[in-house]
Image (cartoon, coloured by chain):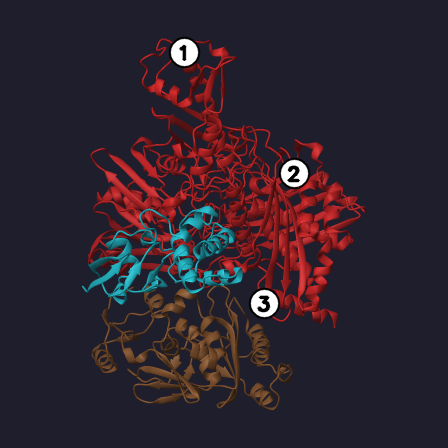
Amino acid sequence: MPDSGTNTGIGASVRRKEDFRFLTGKGKYTDDLNRPGQAHAYFLLSPHARAKINGIDTNAAKQAPGVVDVFTAADLAADGVSGPICGWVVTQKNGEPHKSPAVSALASDRVNYVGEQVAIVVAETLAQAKDAAELIEVNYQPQPALIKMKDALANGAAQLHDDVPGNLCFDWEIGDKAATDAAFKKAHHVTKIDIHNNRLIPNAIEPRAAIGDYDSGMDMMTLYTTSQNPHVARLVLAAFMGLGPENKLRVVAPDVGGGFGSKIYVYRDEIVTLWAAKKLGRPVKWTAERSASFLTDAHGRDHDTHAELAVDKDGTFLGLRVSTLANVGAHNQIFSTATPSYLYGCLLAGQYRTPAVYGEVKTVFTNTAPVDAYRGAGRPEATFVVERLVEKTAKEMGIDRAELRRRNFIPPDQFPYQSPCLVQYDSGDFPHLLDRAMEVIDYAGFSARKQASAERGKLRGIGLSCWIEACGLAPSAVVGFLGGGVGQWESANIKFNPTGSVTLYTGSHSHGQGHETVFAQIISEHLGVPVESVEVVHGDTAVVPFGMGTYGSRSGPVGGGAVYKAAQKIVEKGRKIAAHLLEASVEDIEYAGGTYSVAGTDRTKTMAEIAFAAYVPHNYPLDVLEPGLDETAFFDPMNFTFPSGAYFAEVEVDPDTGVVTVLDMVGIDDVGTVMNPMIVAGQLHGGFAQGIGQALYEQCVYDENGQLLTGSLMDYCMPRADHFPSFRTEETNQPCPHNPLGVKGCGEAGAIGSPVAMLNAVIDAIGVNIDMPATPEKVWRALQSQAQAAE
Amino acid sequence: MPTVSMTVNGQPAAGEVEGRTLLVEFLREHLGLTGTHVGCDTSQCGACVVHVDGKSVKSCTLLAVQAVGTEVTTIEGLATNGTLHPVQAAFKEHHGLQCGFCTPGMVMSAVDLLSQNASPSEPEIREWLEGNICRCTGYHNIVKAIDAAAQAMKG
Amino acid sequence: MYNFNYYRPLSLEEAAQVLSAASDGKLMSGGMTLIPTLKQRLANPSDLVDLSEIADLSGIEAKGDTVVIGATTTHAEVADSEVVKSQIPALAALAESIGDPQVRNRGTIGGSIANNDPAADYPAGLLGLGATIKTDRRQIPADDFFTGMFETALEEGEIVTAVSVPIPKKAAYAKFPNPASRYAIVGVMVAQGPAGTRVAVTGAGPGVFRVAKMETALEKNFSANAIEGISVPAKGLNADMHASADYRAHLVGVMARRAVTAAG
């Protein structure tokens, strides 16, 4: 690990400021908080995937010991409270907006998935609430469930929502269909694949939780919740769910135990818990049990795709055609339309010069939990399509996998590069990434390693992915143009304290990413204040400036950009104060590393002296300058950032059992400027684990009746320590040209590039195409079918 | 309701609980020791690992009444006078935590491992962590941290 | 969890008394299966009788050509026991493969076999080694003890006190774990010794079973090659999303051969 030494600025592996409290059990997660007089909530969840509700009898439950009250949809509707919303309007092929059915705050006349919240029981203790929930009688009229997308789309299929004919959320396209068709006409070779991107359950280790609190004296509602974006939650609760106005609502997201996208959304349980607290005039606390998390957290991925790549005889890509069905589950959520459209289709060109690309996506409502953004959100799915196709093409044409990619890379001198899929890539050096990855994995030595494995009766495989993604969610103008409902800037407020220390308020939210350290490093770098003298505050709408929160790998590029901008404002104000104190003109004041000096002299003032003067303005130019050293900035960049990478995976397969052992995982990443190498590597490691989890272990399975078969950690295989070797990561640095720090997002990269590298390695080992996850039985069956075919 | 008493982090602790009260509920709700977390309901994730009579156990799968008369150590009892235990210090030095939620259980589990095996190999560390799930780190730096702690504790 | 009364008796007699007085009493040892079951509200006993403080029920001892293990001995104690490691290393390895370290610190051999989960490891261990289960009333050979899925020969209120395991000449356990739960998808104990040549399989079927054809073949020639062509029929085996019956049948062969090779 790089030594942090004494440098605490950008580029140093500063050890994390937040760790002490987490390591000593002093972190404060939502469930660790308690409000005086709080009651406990438990939600009754639907046992049916699709049923009419003919009535709900809560009388017995209301009489049960300790019960404060029981509420259903009717109670919320009476108060004008409604359910989750969609935050992004996708315009369909026919020019119409996507279908977004209205969602109630609790299920009212029907349920559309197992786990849908039907009633809330509030009691003195959680055990009493659970006891009472068993006494609620719901008169369900079960109906056949639509679980598979093709069944939901079939002619004459029943409808989940009265206002969504054919259960089609949208039918959308991107790219140039005519040009792509023309490219296929002149193709020498066409590679075709039909692939499934497996459905995943995010499983942040902290289950979602919420505490509603109402101060009647102030008429102020407070929601403590496990959110990645408390201000967005407040905006949505106030503007769309009837729990406003915004100035009378405070949302606090304290320490949050991982998000991965699943804690972006405002869920029914949060809405109802907050409402119940006001209704009852006492705090109400709710925490999901893991089994409820499996059923109610937004799931991820779940695409069925047919794709074709048209190739010239020398391996040059001519055109790419992609047709995808994406499952949105029972209803929309904030990003559930953006994820399978723009966050997916815009990346279909990958790292290649493919001149013509056409993609079409149909999204489908089914009787399953809502599907939304999960680490990578659309981009792992795009990378999976492109890099499976490329790998298969190399095999079919007999061209080395690395060589085929190299022939088609966008050259480093072509940036910025306008992709045929709307976006403009900012910077990159793809050949360099691949060269370095080949060196690190020892690509040339693979055949000898394969031979050695064969001698031990094992099948060895190597897999590659060369990927690019778009993240650092912003800019507002583009997001708005594409249908997004909000701005995508970020805010920062730097407050110097009179004694020279700093409190930074950020609109970003840390739930593991280390903002408290990295943002302090930006302050240290640009204002000369040591990291330990910087307090980073986030997660409370009553305290921090309005911010858009953390998702889409946006905290570094956008949130960090705001911190930088605020720091520059501080420097400029300080310059004026320094000019006064040093009796020089502002133009003659130079600034470097926390010290102002008069050019050509040894007269200086430190930032601490400037801060003191700003707050104790005894000798201060009050006629031209306000007291105080406190600046706020909002940063809205001109483009997304485009991290890229080359990943190799190497595996060994036991042909007797089909078990895949991961031998090596190498990632060479371009994430722009690396602010803290230790933290960046950690983000990549975590992404690898989730990506390899998708490739080999994880899958969400519903049976034909819509019951979740993988409803606990007994059946949903979360990756564990003994599934992995140590990972090997390296970062190269092609600074992002359109944010001041030059950073590209790194939070999702590992999960975007690794699944397909891993699957490619398994397929290379066994010589048969299979889908993710490559479970032992699936691999074993593939080998059996191959052996039978050979006979 | 039964009264339970035990020693927690070296201090006597007692309270009235139901028979069905779990040890983790007693620790978090009666004693306010919220460092021990609950991440699942099937004894898989290990966020709730504490030591009972010196051995690591899942406090979500133990009734408070079963722990009567035992010595319980939680994450809050590991550091002494503000000085981190070598395992805690190594987790910080090697970035063995991100969101911090699995961390208390991970650390308590690792301390138990090192009490039984002063020099675990990498595979031994990885196998030992069967009962602790982390969603953030990919385990890479957790394994490094435990290895470094083993070295540090050997002096 | 529904509420219940909790007792921690200090003797077998007291345990039996409390249990018989309860309207729907349940014995508990480590609670590693029972507590998760209660948390899911899948059981609603009136009383829990915790056997863990009954002194005579815990401990490991070599007695003649057997090793006797008390019912409340934990998996960790079996795995770490010098007696078991030296006399029946296959059983120590089996115990080490159960669950995770924290489960092994609480879960007990008596609890495991009384529950007789079709995917638990000990039933294969005890059946494969030809053990005898001792209760507060009698001694039951493993062949008669495990009667079906979650079913045993135990009568109402009968308490397992110990298991007596004959020391084999050679034995090994090979396990193919469920990647999520770590229970056995297939686990095979192969042993040769005073109880004859035995092949016992857990995880694959509705309950632990022996594979007579393999036993006969191994009797003649204790080598992996000897059972190479012997398969168990897939019909009647368990099937779920982790493994079909065909795959389980295949794995029984693979694991059996690996166990034979490991047993040497």
In the displayed orientation, state which residue is furthest to the front.
Answer: B155
Circles 3 and 1, Cβ within 8 Å, touching? The answer is no
Task: From the viewer's side, name the closer residue of A132 and A645.
Answer: A645
Colour cyan belongs to chain: B
Q: Is residue A376 visible?
A: no
Q: Split into 4 quadrants, where in the image is the C terminus of chain A? A: bottom right
Chain C, which colour?
Answer: brown
Chain hosting mark 1: A
Residue type at numbered disc 1:
His
Q: Position of residue A771 (x, y in %)?
A: 61, 58
- Chain drawn red, letter? A
> Of marks 3 and 1, which one's residue comes earlier in the chain?
1
Q: Amino acid at mark 2?
A: Gly
Give the number of the mark in front: 2 or 3: 3
Q: Nearer the viewer, mark 3 or mark 1?
A: 1
Label 1 crowd bin: few (<14), some (14–19), many (20+), radius 10 Å: some
- Residue A424 position in % (x across, y down): 63, 33
Left or right: residue A75 compared with residue A706: left
Which of A17/C242 is in front?
A17
Q: Is residue A8 among what the camera can see?
A: yes
Kind of residue sitting beneath label 3: Glu
Task: Choose top left, top right, bottom left or bottom right for residue A758.
Answer: bottom right
Determine whether the residue tagged by mark 2 lies in a helix, strand or loop.
strand
User: Which residue corresponds to mark 1?
Assistant: A580
Q: Position of residue A600 (x, y in %)?
A: 52, 12
Q: CA distance from mark 2 to mark 3?
A: 39 Å
Say which residue label 3 marks: A777
- Mark nearer the viewer, 2 or 1: 1
